[in-house]
């Protein structure tokens, strides 16, 4: 991709600088080589290529069928194909949850994310992605997630990821019924009183 090209041209310069630095600071190199040896020989540290990973994507395709409910000034936020983030492979650390990966991958791509902590569910609630918020496309609209095609009925910061999981964030305009997750949609009830 385009982003890799500048790095490749910059690396030779870095190498030159580090080789100059080695000549003048030979005292610092032994500790560096010790660390490398312990990484290779120590079996406690798993090799970096064995990190668990999942795929994650973000889509608001349902809005395309409901543009009449979306405020005019938000139409430009909806991609023509409804895809905000195409499926990408994301590495994670053991014990991380769906929210950890979502926030990291969106931040990496400078995609807006807004969330709040919901004490009643002791979980993070996703309010908006890409400046598209719950209720933006009708009173039954908002963000939901599925893992391997199943919509969990608890918050994304409680869902611990497993290697190979497929996480899909989708915008629903009908409490999940239009995305196949009608049973799992949970919304804070305060708005409905």
Image (spheres, rainbow, N blue to C red):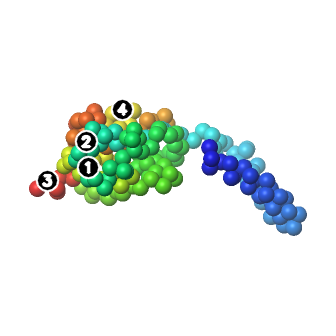
Where the C terminus falls, by quadrant? bottom left
Is label 4 in a helix, a strand or a loop? Answer: loop
Q: Is residue 17 above or below residue 52?
A: below
Q: Position of residue 32 (x, y in %)?
A: 77, 57
Q: Is residue 131 above or below residue 95?
A: below
The residue that mark 1 highlights is 70
Q: CA distance from mark 2 to mark 1?
A: 7 Å
Taking the view exactly as shown, the residue that stands out farthest to the bottom is 24
Label 4 environment density (alpha carbons within 10 Å; few <14, some 14–19, many ≥20): few
Chain-order first, disc 3 or disc 2: 2
Q: CA distance from mark 3 to mark 1?
A: 20 Å
Is label 2 in a helix, a strand or a loop? Answer: loop
Chain-order first, disc 3 or disc 1: 1
**Mark toward the viewer: 4 or 2:** 2
Taking the view exactly as shown, the residue that stands out farthest to the left is 193
At a point 79% along the width and 57% down the height, the residue shown is 13
Chain-order first, disc 3 or disc 4: 4
Where the N terminus falls, by quadrant? top right
Q: Are marks 2 and 1 in contact (CB under 8 Å)?
A: yes
Q: CA distance from mark 4 to mark 1?
A: 27 Å
Q: CA distance from mark 4 to mark 2?
A: 23 Å
Tag of residue 192: 3
Residue in front for this viewpoint, 118 or 109: 109
**Mark toward the viewer: 3 or 1:** 1
């Amino acid at each position: 991709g385009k982003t890799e090209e500048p790095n490749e041209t910059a690396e030779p310069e870095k190498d030159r600088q580090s080789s100059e630095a080695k000549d003048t600071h030979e005292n610092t190199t032994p500790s560096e080589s010790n660390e490398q040896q312990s990484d290779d020989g120590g079996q406690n540290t798993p090799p970096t290529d064995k990190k668990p990973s999942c795929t994650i994507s973000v889509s608001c395709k349902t809005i395309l069928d409901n543009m009449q409910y979306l405020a005019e000034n938000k139409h430009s936020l909806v991609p023509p194909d409804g895809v905000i983030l195409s499926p990408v492979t994301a590495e994670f650390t053991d014990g991380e949850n769906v929210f950890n990966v979502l926030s990291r991958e969106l931040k990496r791509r400078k995609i807006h994310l807004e969330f709040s902590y919901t004490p009643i569910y002791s979980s993070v609630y996703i309010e908006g992605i890409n400046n598209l918020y719950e209720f933006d496309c009708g009173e039954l609209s908002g963000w939901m997630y599925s893992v391997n095609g199943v919509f969990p009925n608890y918050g994304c910061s409680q869902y611990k990821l497993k290697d190979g999981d497929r996480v899909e964030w989708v915008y629903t305009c009908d409490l999940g019924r239009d995305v196949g997750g009608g049973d799992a949609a949970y919304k804070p009830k305060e708005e409905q009183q």
